[in-house]
């Protein structure tokens, strides 16, 4: 129980006025806003031109909008944002893969080559930074608002998180970032993804023995990262990434 859910009104009703004002100012631009499309042409753009932003901007817009609407609904508590929230959850659940185009070639079961589009048979055999963050964000939205969402929406959300993330992690320890490949160098992907998997597991896995088993694996994977991390605590991608590297070990 890390945060108050929407039904726990004492905290939400007494938020800092500046926080309330900020989200109240966001709401008009978010309510009723069409879900950003994610087309095959947009996904393939990275293959053809190397441009990541065309796809990722729309991809991240879905996620940022969803979480902002979830907070708006928790504050207002009138139900007016729920239809938009459910549409976004459904749209994200319908995505062929949560892995962005620039990371597609890193699938350990693929041939290592950049492809125009995600192959459906490989779409659920790989977890990248963005897929892990997506699962974490959806888990938090469900935690906060699950009691107000349609049962079918909640069931779909939970199935997607299990099928795309938790099951994939267990089935594919050969993924390069896991820490289970002897002799393989690790970078910020390891703690960045594990910090999200921890939230996903604690918020979704009710079976205590399964939850403990997963957390122990995450700890083992993080130990492998720490064993190779430089003593100065620096990040291989520069200081701007420190919160997604060494600092993520602590989250």
Image: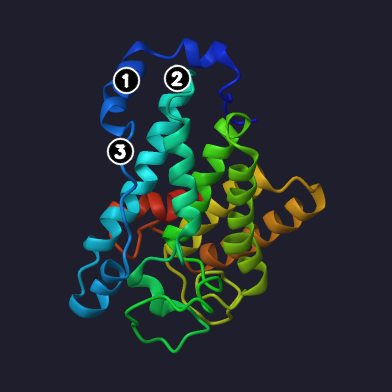
The residue depicted at 36 percent of the width and 17 percent of the height is 20
The residue depicted at 20 percent of the width and 69 percent of the height is 51
The residue depicted at 42 percent of the width and 78 percent of the height is 106
Q: Is residue 97 above or below residue 25?
A: below
x, y (%) of residue 243?
38, 49
Residues at marks 3 and 1, CA–CA distance in whole angstroms: 15 Å
Q: In the rendered image, is residue 158 in sight? A: yes
Q: Choose the circle earlier in sequence order: 2 or 3.
A: 3
Task: Tell which tag, 3 or 1, sits nearer the viewer.
Answer: 3
Residue at the extreme bottom of the image, as rendered: 111
Q: Is the residue marked by circle 3 packed among few (<14), some (14-19), or many (20+) residues within 10 Å? A: few
Quarter of the image for residue 19 reads top left
Q: Choose the circle earlier in sequence order: 2 or 1.
A: 1
Q: What element does badge 2 sit on?
A: helix
Reading the image, the residue beneath label 1 is 24
The residue depicted at 56 percent of the width and 23 percent of the height is 6
Reading the image, the residue beneath label 3 is 33
Q: Is residue 239 above or below residue 204?
A: below
Q: What element does badge 1 sit on?
A: helix
Q: Is the residue marked by circle 1 packed among few (<14), some (14-19), or many (20+) residues within 10 Å? A: some
The N terminus appears in which quarter of the rendering?
top right
Quarter of the image for residue 47 reads bottom left
Relative placement, left or right, of 193 versus 48 is right
Q: Is residue 83 above or below residue 170?
A: above
Reading the image, the residue beneath label 2 is 75
x, y (%) of residue 235?
35, 60
């Amino acid at each position: 129980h890390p945060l108050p859910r929407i039904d726990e009104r004492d905290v939400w009703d007494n938020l800092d006025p500046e926080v309330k004002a900020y989200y109240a100012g966001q709401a008009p631009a978010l309510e009723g806003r069409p879900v950003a499309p994610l087309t095959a042409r947009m996904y393939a753009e990275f293959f053809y031109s190397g441009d990541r932003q065309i796809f990722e901007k729309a991809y991240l817009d879905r996620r940022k909008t969803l979480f902002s609407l979830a907070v708006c609904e928790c504050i207002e508590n009138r139900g007016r944002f729920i239809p938009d929230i459910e549409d976004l959850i459904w749209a994200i659940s319908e995505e062929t893969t949560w892995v962005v185009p620039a990371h597609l070639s890193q699938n350990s079961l693929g041939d290592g080559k950049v492809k125009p589009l995600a192959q459906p048979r490989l779409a659920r055999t790989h977890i990248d930074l963005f897929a892990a963050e997506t699962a974490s964000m959806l888990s938090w939205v469900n935690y906060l608002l699950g009691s107000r969402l349609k049962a079918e929406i909640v069931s779909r959300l939970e199935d997607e998180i299990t099928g795309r993330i938790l099951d994939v992690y267990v089935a594919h320890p050969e993924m390069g970032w896991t820490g289970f490949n002897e002799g393989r160098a690790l970078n910020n992907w390891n703690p960045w993804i594990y910090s999200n998997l921890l939230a996903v597991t604690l918020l979704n896995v009710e079976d205590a023995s399964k939850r403990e088993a997963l957390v122990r694996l995450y700890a083992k994977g993080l130990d492998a990262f720490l064993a190779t991390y430089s003593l100065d605590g620096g990040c291989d991608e520069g200081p701007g990434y420190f919160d997604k590297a060494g600092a993520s070990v602590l989250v």
